[in-house]
Image: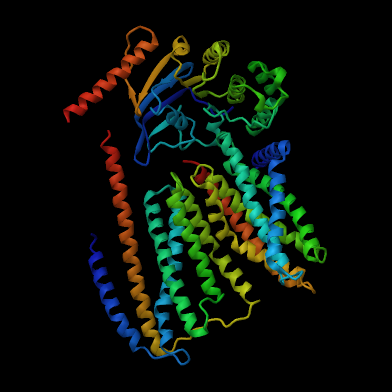
Amino acid sequence: MGFDFDRLVVDDVSRHFGRRRALSRVSLTCGAGTILGLLGPNGAGKSTLLAILSTLLAPTSGRVRYGEHDARAAGPMLRGRLGLLGHDLYLYPELTARENLEFFARLYGLDRPRDRVDGALANAGLADRAGDAVSGFSRGMRQRLALERALLHGPRLLLLDEPFTGLDDASGRALVNRLRGLRDEGAIVIAATHDLDLAEGLLDEVAILREGRLLAVPRAAGPLRERYREAIVEAGAAAAREGRAR
Amino acid sequence: MSRVFVPLVLAAMVLFASAPLVVAGAPFEQTMGLVQKIFYYHVPSAMLMFVSAFVCGIASAVYLFRRSAAADRVAVAAGELVVLFGLIVLVTGPLWARKAWGVWWEWDARLTSSLLLWMIYLAYLLVRRFGGPGSEKLAGAMALFGMANVPFVYVSVNYWRTLHPKTSVVMTLAPGMRAAFWFCVAAFAILYVLLLTLRKRLEDRQATVEQLYLATED
Amino acid sequence: MRQFLRVAWVVMRKDLTVEMRSREIVYTTVFFAASCVLVFAFALVREGRPLEDASAGILWISIAFAGTLGLGRTFERERHTETLRALMLAPSDRPAIYVGKLLGILVLMAIVEAVLVPLIGLLFHAPIFARPHWLVALLAAGTLGFASVGTLFAAMLVRARSRDVLLPVLLYPITIPVIIAGVRGTAAIFQATPDEPMARFWAALLVFFDVVFVTLSLWTFEPLMTE
């Protein structure tokens, strides 16, 4: 447990793919014990930003710092403190739930793999299905299992890409509670989501992306949905004004 | 245009204008006569093909390990030149073989090795073209592996051949031919440097355009 | 170092476990290899007598084709679940993942060869028991050379377009020295009087190839797999 950090700093990060600008000079900061919501329309760059934060992608300019450690300089140790729940769940359908978790526990070199796996299965509510192949699970069950897989090694930074898709009401609320618990333990949780209702009570901070740029979030009180819509509409109007002025 | 560029172009033009005269002036080889003169094109092209393969391989290694975009641009220029000069080798070789041995293709060690190297770098270009996004790195690996493969290709093809005994090409240069030969080597070398520089410059321009395009969006 | 080996072992075990559940790749690849042998047999055998050295050539071509198929299918599986990303996220030396995948491929190809060699012996009356240790050495060194380059290329092609056709396009030219050495070495063993010095020469070349290309692959795996 040598490597740790308590603050995530994204500094002027841009990323382009050929001519397509996916992210444009995004800067934000996040301290321990925060849940940050990443909102925005499809194609806004949320997944790209999450990929960069998980070190799977390198920014084309700008830097990301985890505590004092720069993303490029920090090696494998940094990855041990990150957890990613992607859109694709990263589970092996041919293996059982237990085997999936045990594989990742061993891959990460965790001590007491058996105990951790048992605990994770209990948290996911899948203890009775531990010996069944994942291919037979519903989307919600897979999601719960995938979340536990991302949390097995106790990451400081948890990145979630659309974690609420496919979850029914009860599972959604269970996830909200789980994330709150993690936040209270000091984790940094960044979740990209479309589900503004569920996110309502959950998010401490909000970042809205549109076409790769971070928008200013209206401070006004009011439901999240309204503030989001306002920000998007305002940004669209601003872009139109700029277009006319040219 | 750098200062060295114009003199280089002039030198290349002069060399190529006088090359046919030099080649014609060189003595005839005993057994093969006029046909042998194709070697003045064949051998320098082969030398430059190998040189270019190493340039491409090393540039690709720099690109992969240092993430230098400029190195990648050199690599693609060199890769294309491997294919170009390789084509010259593979066309002039059979032309010569037809006259000398009566067959279009001989499993001669050097010609076969050149064919293999040519195909490796052709694959390099194919990957760059059809590999989709991120294909520069894939191609870079291909070039690096191709370069590392050169000794293995040569040894294995050479010893594979000895089991099919055929006459190999052993060229001994008579003194009169040496001048013409090295003249042509120099001419081709200058041409190579010119083409490499031009092609890299084209890539540089393209990269600048891309950057400008992206910058307008800010 | 211990961590490196542990990660490689865990990855290999996982691959073999996944494969053992359905055995899809093993069955189809072995069958494909056997079909290759038959196709070549029909093409190259005249009046019941195969061309000289045909058995060695057919063996290695079938290994190359079946190996390419197996590589493609194995990595297609990883691509389908995007689990290669999860592997890259692990806090381990990334080359360890390459080694783990390589070991899994080697096991697959060993199974294929265990079927192919007796088949060749049967159909072409090839003397597979003449110098078994040389045969095994050639097969082991050659397969390692082929698989080391193949695993690297297949892994890096996972996110590329046209990956099905690009794998053979990239792999075959680079591994031609392996094929040449394998075929000539095996042919030397299959001769009426086995030519051991020749086999030793080709086996040594294969070992050199393995050393160079496994090292190169270990070096280039991380830069290639990160964007």
In the image: residue B19, left or right of residue A63: left
Q: How is the image coloured?
A: rainbow
Q: Is residue C157 visible?
A: yes
- Closest to the observer, A237 or B103: B103
Residue A211, image x, y percentages: 34, 28
> Quick check: C217 above or below C47?
above
- The number of numbered discs placed on residues in the rendered structure image is 0
Tell me the quarter of the picture where residue C173 sits. Answer: bottom right
> Quick check: B159 above or below A149?
below
Residue C98, image x, y percentages: 61, 45
Residue A130, image x, y percentages: 71, 22
Q: Quadrant of the C terminus of chain A?
A: top left
Residue at 32% x, 17% y: name it: A231
> Quick check: B167 above or below B76?
below
Tell me the quarter of the picture where residue A210 sits. Answer: top left
Furthest toward the top, the residue is A222
Residue A53, image x, y percentages: 46, 30
- Closest to the observer, A14 or B81: B81
Residue at 52% x, 27% y: name it: A87
Furthest toward the front, the residue is C47
- Closest to the observer, A235 or C21: C21
Residue at 72% x, 40% y: name it: C23
Residue at 40% x, 84% y: name it: B37
Q: Is residue C203 visible?
A: no
Q: Quadrant of the N terminus of chain A?
A: top right
